[in-house]
Image (tube, rainbow, N blue to C red):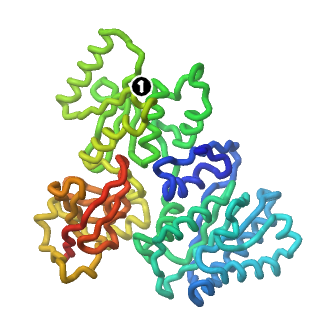
């Protein structure tokens, strides 16, 4: 079942992005206007790690969590709310927090709130109204990246136990963490998550209406002209594309427009109802006029979509990929503090990577050197080895004109950390592709 009723829509989004991007859970949790803020994160200044592996603890982080729980337990807004604490490294941190809570709150209050502390698997199949997450890691000790499938499962469980509110306590910033580390993905999620919208409608609300409204009698929300358009828009939004609905150009309207990098694609949702030869000719005339202005169109037929969604959209994913229109996974606005730091740290790519300063290529004798941010990588699709491509991996926004791709695009995620001649799998909207790294060019 793809329907999800436990978590607030914002909370389940991390798990959707991490584990269910191909078949996302549809959040159907109902809520009123006075709900708790679903996401919050607390930076523990001066946090430090002691010990290692299962014995790792972060005392300042533990004390901050205990203090926050004590405050909330005395606040009437949280009356009757159950709570839990999950630690994202080892076991000792959970024991430390639990002992401090027993001393601060007492066993009776902890029992009343079903308040336990443990690792993610302590909460497998369980839930609480409010969950507190302790990242534990701190910059005073080496932070090894968490990248394995077992780590993904742990983070998926940890980030999907809260019904109403999830609070992350951390002693590191994104700049302290590897671009590949799940800790960084989780922290970026908390820092950057904001309601995804299309035409002023939050995606979660659109998901709810698409799943629950009686389409025979209820019209789709404006500006959509059909539920078919809504379904196509949701397929794109679930993959984090930027989508415009009923986009007006020179007095003409396009059903959907997908934007990304320096390109855009117009999508026409061709319904099965025949509106007559005059309407058809008007539509074709409108398309020809816009094509003369540089617009490119892709058509999706309603009957094909509902009979076989995968086949119907495969051409769309190929069309977007061909035009270097990729999902936007991260907030790279100038207002983002993380992005501002990275802009200071990272050089802007030149207009043409081939015209930039000389790169140092990595060849056979240096296979221990792996792809890193700021490298230019030459790669091929193993099913089409003649079509050689290269990409500069950067913290900046993807820019197809200069061959730059953001570190959070699917191809960059697949390439980062891999050595020369390795074969990697990139999960693109059109499906998984296998790529071979032919060359790694290091910046001078």
Query: Relative to the observer, which residue lies in front, 408 or 386?
Result: 386
Query: Relative to the observer, which residue lies in front, 116 or 289?
Result: 116
Q: Horizontally, is 250 left or right of 303 in the view? A: left
Image point 19% across, 72% down: which residue?
Answer: 441
Q: Is residue 441 above or below residue 231?
A: below
**Furthest-front residue in view?**
383
**Furthest-bottom residue in view?**
51
Image point 61% across, 84% down: which residue?
Answer: 54
Please tell me how crowded label 1 is: few (under 14), some (14-19), or many (20+) other residues with Cα within 10 Å: few
Q: Quadrant of residue 304?
A: top left
Residue 210 image point, x, y percent: 55, 33
Image point 38% across, 52% down: which residue?
Answer: 328
Image point 65% across, 84% down: which residue?
Answer: 59
Reading the image, the residue beneath label 1 is 303
Residue 265 image point, x, y percent: 29, 38
Residue 258 image point, x, y percent: 34, 40
Q: Circle 1 sits in a helix, a strand or a loop, which is it?
A: helix
Q: Quadrant of residue 66?
A: bottom right
Q: Is residue 316 above or below residue 122?
A: above
Residue 80 image point, x, y percent: 82, 57
């Amino acid at each position: 079942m793809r329907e999800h009723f436990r978590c607030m829509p914002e909370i389940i989004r991390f798990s959707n992005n991490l584990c269910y991007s191909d078949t996302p859970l549809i959040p159907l949790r109902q809520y009123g206007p006075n709900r708790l803020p679903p996401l919050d994160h607390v930076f523990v200044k001066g946090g430090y790690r002691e010990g290692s592996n299962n014995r790792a603890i972060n005392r300042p982080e533990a004390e901050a969590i205990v203090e926050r729980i004590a405050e909330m337990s005395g606040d009437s807004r949280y009356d009757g709310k159950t709570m839990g604490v999950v630690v994202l490294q080892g076991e000792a941190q959970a024991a430390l927090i639990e002992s401090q809570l027993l001393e601060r709150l007492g066993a009776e209050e902890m029992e009343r709130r079903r308040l336990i502390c443990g690792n993610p698997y302590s909460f497998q199949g369980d839930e609480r109204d409010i969950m507190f997450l302790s990242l534990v890691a701190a910059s005073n000790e080496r932070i090894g990246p968490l990248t394995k499938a077992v780590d993904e499962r742990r983070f998926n469980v940890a980030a999907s136990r809260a019904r109403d509110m999830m609070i992350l306590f951390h002693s590191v910033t994104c700049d302290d963490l590897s671009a590949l580390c799940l800790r960084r993905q989780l922290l970026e999620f908390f820092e950057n998550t904001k309601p995804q919208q299309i035409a002023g409608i939050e995606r979660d609300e659109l998901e709810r209406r698409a799943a629950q409204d009686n389409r025979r009698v209820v019209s789709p929300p404006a500006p959509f002209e059909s539920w078919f358009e809504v379904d196509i828009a949701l397929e794109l939004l679930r993959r984090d594309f930027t989508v415009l609905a009923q986009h007006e150009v020179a007095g003409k309207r396009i059903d959907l427009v997908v934007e990304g990098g320096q390109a855009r694609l117009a999508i026409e949702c061709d319904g099965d109802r025949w509106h007559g030869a005059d309407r058809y000719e008007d539509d074709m005339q409108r398309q020809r006029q816009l094509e003369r202005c540089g617009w490119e169109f892709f058509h999706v037929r309603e009957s094909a979509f509902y009979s076989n969604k995968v086949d119907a959209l495969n051409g769309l994913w190929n069309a977007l990929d061909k035009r270097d229109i990729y999902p936007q996974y991260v907030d790279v606005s100038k207002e983002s503090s993380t992005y501002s730091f990275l802009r200071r740290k990272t050089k802007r790519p030149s207009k043409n990577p081939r015209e930039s300063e000389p790169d140092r290529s990595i060849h056979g004798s240096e296979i221990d050197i792996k792809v890193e941010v700021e490298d230019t990588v030459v790669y091929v699709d193993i099913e089409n080895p003649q079509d050689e491509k290269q990409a500069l991996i950067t913290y900046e926004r993807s820019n197809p004109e200069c061959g730059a791709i953001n570190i959070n695009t699917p191809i960059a995620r697949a390439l980062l950390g891999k050595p020369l001649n390795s074969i990697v799998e990139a999960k693109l909207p059109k499906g998984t592709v296998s790529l071979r790294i032919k060359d790694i060019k290091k910046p001078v």
